[in-house]
Amino acid sequence: MGKVISAGHICLDITPVFPAEHRYDRIGDLLVPGSLIRMEAASVHTGGSVGNTGLALKKLGNDVTLLGKIGNDAFGSMVRNILSGYGAGGLIVDEEGSTAYTVVLAVPGIDRIFLHNPGANDTFSAGDIPEEALDGAVLFHFGYPSLMKRMFGENGAELRKMFRRIRGKGIATSLDLAAVDPKSDAGRADWEAILRGVLPDVDFFVPSFEELCYILDRGCYDALSAKGGNMTELEGIPQMADGLARKCLEMGCGAVLVKCGLSGMVWRTGSRERLAQTGERLRLDPGAWAEREGMQPCFRAETVRSATGAGDVSIAAYLTALMNGESPGNCVKLAAAEGAASVSGYDSLSGVLPLEELKQRIAEYESGERSFI
């Protein structure tokens, strides 16, 4: 297993813990002006792609270099302290910027709500990836360009520049997205054009259904949003995701995994010719990966404390499995299982399990011997 670079968005996640015995149907039933809501202790941890996927990759035994940007402030000190507990560092300090933070409202009975300030992530550029960090790297994973202003500005010029440079060195690449706020600068960007520009240099594209649907089929996204509730619980989501995955392959990526929440995961891989272009350091077998597809059901966890970061850690399992030489179907199954394992905690990392333990749990779950978590 070789060196992995996890770069992109990093922040401090602050998750107020609501009493478990209360459930709500609408956020308006909870957030009433002038009211006092009794809470439990908050969970404070790193978030974003670097804080979630990067550290999960490290917990899964990979040699990981983290590259994210923080400010020289109190939140930045907290981020550094958390990362040092995992034996990780590598952060870039923007002396003029602030550290990004997210307040995660994981209300029992209601899908998560995120209050986010991107902070120093907005100044992250292709030049923030030092040349020496690329030495010996097998895989480069980048997450959340939609929350990083320089990455989506000028139709993603910095994003294209970065991926082209890194893939040109024989390093395999992967890309994850984040939700787009329609009222923000990111919401006014031409994301379909950005994807068309960067996906030819992305070997593994791992977005969520909501993110991809917003970008590639806004009419469908608006219609699904109007129905209320958790979009991924609606009927027909895997079939819609498959259509979006096909379009991503047409745009030039090597393989696509669409995270569909409670509807599982949908995946497709490209042609043998395209997969043969995957970073040579990864040594992917194009014949074993070419022109495959599938729909992986969700593993149901008995205890769900927070789904925050579940998609991110599922990506870490997917990337670790493919570097270990697993088949594409097994990579996706392990990704779904890791995502289910992670929801047992309020943070994304406490529930992360080694891949061998996941395989054992999957076997027992599929034989009916046990619930998954």
Image: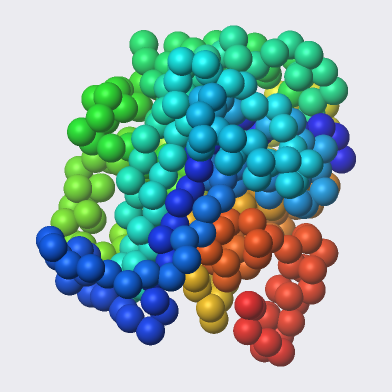
Taking the image as drawn, is residue 198 in sight?
no
Q: Quadrant of the N terminus?
A: top right
Q: Is residue 301 left or right of residue 183?
A: right
Residue depicted at 70% across the width and 13% down the height: 130
Q: Is residue 26 left or right of residue 326?
A: left
Nearest to the observer: residue 263 or residue 246: 263
Nearest to the observer: residue 373 or residue 86: 86
Q: Is residue 336 above or below residue 316?
A: below
Residue depicted at 68% across the width and 19% down the height: 167
Q: Is residue 66 above or below residue 149?
A: below
Residue depicted at 78% across the width and 60% down the height: 355
Q: Is residue 9 left or right of residue 22?
A: right
Nearest to the observer: residue 353 or residue 326: 353
Q: Residue furthest bottom?
A: 369
- Residue 62: x, y in percent? 81, 43
Count of numbered marks: 0
- Residue 161: x, y in percent? 55, 11
Residue depicted at 44% across the width and 57% down the height: 15
- Residue 218: x, y in percent? 24, 40
Nearest to the observer: residue 235 or residue 119: 119
